[in-house]
Image (cartoon, rainbow, N blue to C red):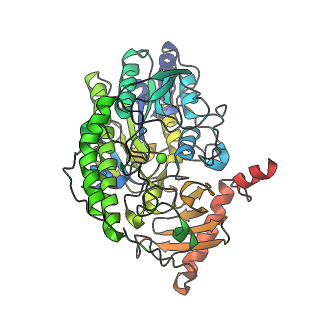
Amino acid sequence: MKPSIQILGLFVACSLAWINGLPAAFPAIADVQSNIDRGPPNIVFLFTDDHAYQSIGAYGSTLVETPHLDQLAKSGMRFDRCLVTNSICGPSRATILSGKYSHANGFLTNNHGVFDGSQVTFPKLLKSAGYQTAMVGKWHLVSDPTGFDYWHVLPGQGAYYNPPMIEMGKQIKHTGYTTDIITEISLDWLKRRDMSKPFLLMCQHKAPHRNWQPNLKHLGHDQDRKYPEPSTLFDDYSGRGNAEHEQDMTIAKTMSKDDLKLDEPKGMTPEQLEKWNAYYKPRNEKFRNDNLQGKDLVRWKYNRYMHDYLACTKSVDESVGRITDYLKANGLDDNTLIVYSSDQGFYLGEHGWFDKRWIFEESLRTPLIVNWPGVVKPGSTCSQIVSNVDFAETFLEAANVPVPMDMQGRSLIPLLKGETPADWRKSFYYHYYEFPGPHSVSKHYGVVTDRYKLVRFYDKDVTYSELFDLKTDPQELRSVFGEPTYASVQSELETELARLRVELKVPDQDPVEARRGKQ
Ligand code: CA
């Protein structure tokens, strides 16, 4: 583009921005042309809690059908290595909003975290650039949402049935299934929004978070299928250290009667409870009569878990279909950036586990599917290391809003266009802080590359490291830390880990401990 045309383009774009009531967040010159053509894109962020990529058809799963998510991937890009900075609910959300790691945004654990809503977030920046912004569903950051024209959220973890919610500070009691309710509130906002402005909608589900209570219409969706068992369902954690041995997140020992639907749920209407009992009661009676023991008992629990978890994901998939159908029916699909993701990965029986928290693959990797007609090539995939710390920067660049210098991720827009910058990250820093805490997973941090993972566990009686070679050991069953053949790899990873900690300004003292020391 010649300079004179660039200047003309900038003038036109800024004029359009002025007409639309946008303040002086002028678009970058390189992207002016696309803005003249289409205007800033709408952004729809479809988000779930604990949705394992292993249960999504587009990621190769055959556990359950996910036609709407699969369609989103067919018409967009599937990221195969989207890694989270800290694999736990609240901290992941704080990272997404702030574009920063937990130590930088201050929300380190679910246990003690309160999100500082006065800090800069991408919704605030979009709002001040003329976007209309809405947040619906699970928030889970303790403080009230900031940066939104409209918010309607679940308190804390929220309930699966008949959820109380908070609409702009006011308590509201809903009747029905929470995933459907969040979808309906989102659609309702889309219908009555200010049509003259581009918008950001964050539609964030509770599902499929523990305790995996399905929509009653999906009970029995699998016709009592026996699910294929992960080869590590009976993992004995040999080849690894204290942390893996001492966790409390196994299907065998940790799952409660409530998780397994052996107790009647609370908070249902009599009609709902009747449907619940029609499905669970006869199956629970058979289970009690069978008096299963040992591995057979674990297998029963695993199959009950799969039925319930996957039923919850069916409702999520339906929600994706309803929102994308609305966008299409209203001519919004052409210029809307749709992102599907979850706050982190989840175990579906691998290593005998449910839950998340670890730097290991099923926990670290989260689904990411991006649809943006005219920018993203339909049916494309990306194997580069990307992260939830990149989302804020991506949304800001898409809207041509300058990215604050202290955000720690990087916009995915080049990757979405099918271009990989030569200096794209080859390594990734991870840090988990919530110990002591639920599931008793030791604090750890580490560096991840396309092939290796170096992990340092600390905070229990001993501090120790593990090293995994994903090429020879994709299931991460045997640490090779200290083995002579890996000496040079280990040394390189140690150097890279130290470099990343400096680059990301990770404090030497664990920030949770530092806070405790001050109290
Ligand atoms: Ca979560």
Q: Residue at x 25, y 51 (%)?
A: 283
Quarter residue 509 falls in:
bottom right
Q: Residue at x 40, y 50 (%)?
A: 259
Q: Inspect this view and state whether residue 68 appears.
A: no
Task: State which quarter of the image contains the N terminus.
Answer: top left
The vertical placement of 365 against 209, above or below, is below
Residue nearest the observer in this picture, 518 or 44: 518
Q: Residue at x 44, y 15 (%)?
A: 194
Residue nearest the observer in this picture, 426 or 264: 264
Q: Residue placed farthest to the bottom in the image?
A: 484
Relative side of 430 to 186, left or right: right
Q: Residue placed farthest to the left in the image?
A: 223
The vertical placement of 406 against 175, above or below, is below
Measuring from the top left, give residue 483's x and y in whole percent.
55, 84
Residue nearest the observer in this picture, 505 or 3: 505
Relative side of 267 to 447, left or right: left
Measuring from the top left, give residue 169's x and y in whole percent.
56, 21
Q: Inspect this view and state whether residue 266 appears.
A: yes
Measuring from the top left, give residue 294's x and y in whole percent.
35, 70
**Tally of marks:** 0
Relative side of 5 to 226, left or right: right
Relative side of 283 to 105, left or right: left
